[in-house]
Image (spheres, grey):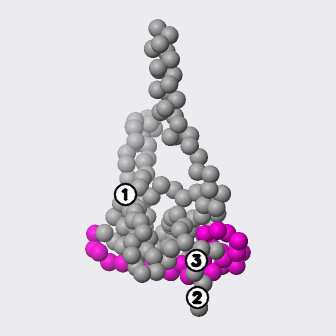
Amino acid sequence: MQLKLFFGLILLLLLFIPATAANNNPYQKIVVINLAYDNGMVKEGSSDIQYGTAPNLNLQSGSIEGLLLDSQKKTINEFSIRDPRNQMGDSVTTGSGGTAQGLIGSTQNNPYVDFGVIVPFTPDLQDVTLIDSLTGNTLISVDLTAPKSAFQQMYPDDPDIKSIQQPV
């Protein structure tokens, strides 16, 4: 009995080790891009680089494909997001006495919507491009030259920033 308990405890510890392992890099950075759909066109509101932990890009899926590109336009990483114009929700249905009977799903399409994209920063990241995977059309390509320069001026001693080659 004690042997089973011992092996059970070891198994439990082994299962939790990957979940509790922390990334000890104090210089993790993210790229935050604020965008807006304006009647079918995607426009950039702002973009900047900040210290922070990036979300897992593989958790979401949708009809917009994102590409993280280097200066040679080679893909570093890719992800997908749902179309932010499609707003989904639930509403309560009521019966004849005004009592709640259940939930009904609803979807609305809003042609004017603000949304954000957050991706991990790497020194070789140059552009973030969003593509409508249904049509193949490029929605927007955000050049990160200005955000990199601004971050570099604020944090010149950051190791990732120091690794970026300066223009000659």
Question: Residue 108's spot in the image, x, y percent?
Answer: 39, 60
Q: Give the distance between the C-alpha atoms of the residues marked 2 and 3, in whole angstroms.
A: 9 Å
Residue 14 visible in rendering: yes
- Residue contact at pointers 1 and 3, CB within 8 angstroms: no
- Tag 1 secondary structure: loop
- Count the labels in the image: 3
1 or 3: tag closer to the N-terminus: 1
Question: Residue 126's spot in the image, x, y percent?
Answer: 49, 77
The circle drawn on residue 167 is: 2
* Above/below status of 21 relative to 65: above
Q: Which residue is mark 3?
A: 164
Magenta-drawn stretch contains 120: no
Label 1: few (<14), some (14–19) or many (≥20) C-alpha neighbours in 10 Å: few
**Camera-nearest label, 1 or 2:** 2
Magenta-drawn stretch contains 142: yes
- Residue contact at pointers 2 and 3, CB within 8 angstroms: no
Label 3: few (<14), some (14–19) or many (≥20) C-alpha neighbours in 10 Å: few
Residue beneath the point at 60% across and 84% down: 166
Residue beneath the point at 60% across and 64% down: 29
Label 2: few (<14), some (14–19) or many (≥20) C-alpha neighbours in 10 Å: few
Tell me which segment is drawn in magenta. Answer: 134-161
Q: Which residue is mark 1?
A: 61
The circle drawn on residue 7 is: none
Report the amino acid beneath label 2: Pro
